[in-house]
Image (cartoon, helix red, strand yellow):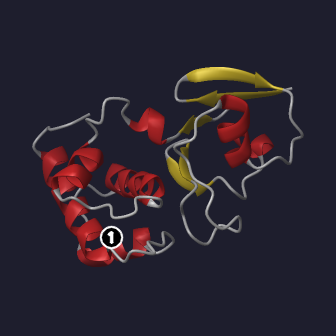
Amino acid sequence: MISLKVNGKWYELDVPADTPLLWVIREQIGLTGTKYGCGIAQCGACTVHVNGQAVRSCVMPVSAAAGKDVVTIEGLSPNGTHPVQQAWVADDVPQCGYCHSGQIMSAAALLAVNPNPTDGDIDQAMAGNICRCGTYQKIRQAIHRAAALKAAGGGK
């Protein structure tokens, strides 16, 4: 049995220790906001937070997350009030939208440690997230907006 805390709720899971965290989140717990993209930690669609750090859940064994605080897109802000979520809507960032839960999780992790990132900081932090629609300029714009919202006390 593996004890896993996801979005503030504890789960006791009878799964092999090497099962990717992504599949446990999606198949065992039933949270489908975290997406499968490549399975080799190259696209970022599966990004979640583990103890506040952005990680690729497709390659992280569930045993490595045991006892840690895992946050998925559903737990970032259930009502969409996180500054990054607000900025994503305000700037109309998504096109197909498939990558955006991972993009948002990476952006939120960046702003948690760097409340006023430069374009270079954003590019570096977001480099592991691929958007096949190419909305990178809007993503950067939204991260700057989210930083301003956060600084002004807006959102979660």
Is residue 66 in view? no
| Residue situated in front as seen by the camera: 28 or 71 | 28
Total marks in image: 1
Name the residue carrying label 1: 122
Q: Quadrant of the C terminus?
A: top left
Q: Residue at x 51, y 43 (%)?
A: 33
Which residue is painted at 54% across and 64% down in the image?
Answer: 44
Left or right, 12 with respect to 138, comes to right
Q: Amino acid at mark 1?
A: Ile
Viewer can see residue 51? yes
Q: Residue at x 33, y 70 (%)?
A: 122
Residue 100 position by quadrant: bottom left
Q: Position of residue 3 (x, y in %)?
A: 75, 26
Q: Position of residue 26 (x, y in %)?
A: 66, 40
Find the residue positioned furthest to the front. Answer: 96
Q: Please name whichever residue, 54 or 40, is drawn nearer the observer in this view of the structure.
A: 40
In this rendering, position of residue 155 left or right of residue 135 = left
Most foreground residue, 114 or 60: 60
The residue sitting at the right extreme is 16
Residue 149 in the image: state x and y as whole percent.
15, 47
The crowding category of the residue bearing disc 1, from other C-alpha atoms within 10 Å (few below 14, some 14 to 19, many at least 20), is many
Q: Residue at x 37, y 57 (%)?
A: 107
Residue 145 vertical placement versus 51 (above, below):
below
Give left or right: position of 123 versus 33: left
Q: Quadrant of the N terminus?
A: top right
Residue in front for this viewpoint, 96 or 61? 96
Secondary structure under tag 1 reads helix
Residue 151 percent location from the top left of the image: 14, 47
